[in-house]
């Protein structure tokens, strides 16, 4: 099985609070954890997260918009392919200081 991620290296324009808000949701965190070991389809994530498919799709969209998740194509051994999702970060760091809250991420290897 191989993948092709649509990761684009660019400066993030995502609002700090958007990242914190999406990380505050248990289903979104479960998706992020599940996709940190490799790409997962929405169907697989629905089973892992034990949430409705509508909820999983909403959380996937939130994670994509927050640049914490990337869409990729997963090619199966039988020649078929499907859309899958994988985490784009290994670490999230939150700094609180006199200038407010800053969220930085470290991309996966």
Image (spheres, helix red, strand yellow):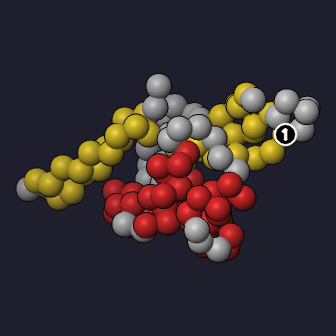
* Rendered position, 46 above or below 13: below
Residue 101 % position (x, y) = 21, 57
Q: Quadrant of the N terminus?
A: top right
Q: In this view, does 107 lie to the left or right of 59?
A: left
**Which residue, as the protein is rendered here, is positioned at the far top?**
109
Q: What element carries label 1?
A: strand
Residue 92 percent location from the top left of the image: 33, 45
Quarter of the view holding residue 56: bottom right
Q: Residue placed at 17% from the left, 58% from the top?
A: 100
The answer to whether one can see residue 67 in this image is no
Residue beneath disc 1: 81
User: Left or right: where does residue 72 sit relative to residue 38?
Assistant: right
Does residue 3 show up? yes
The residue at the point 72 percent across, 58 percent down is 43
What residue lies at 65% left-to-right and 63% top-to-bottom?
Answer: 46
Residue beneath the point at 64% across and 74% down: 52
- For the image, the number of numbered tags is 1
């Amino acid at each position: 099985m191989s993948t092709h991620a649509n990761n684009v290296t660019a400066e993030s324009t995502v609002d700090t609070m958007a990242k914190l808000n999406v990380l505050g949701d248990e289903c979104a965190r479960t998706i992020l954890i599940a996709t940190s070991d490799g790409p997962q389809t929405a169907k697989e994530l629905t089973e892992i997260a034990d949430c409705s498919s509508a909820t999983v799709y909403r959380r996937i969209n939130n994670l994509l918009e927050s640049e914490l998740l990337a869409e990729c194509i997963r090619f199966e051994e039988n020649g078929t392919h499907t859309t899958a999702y994988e985490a784009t970060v290994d670490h999230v760091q939150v700094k609180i200081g006199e200038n407010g809250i800053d969220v930085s991420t470290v991309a996966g290897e």
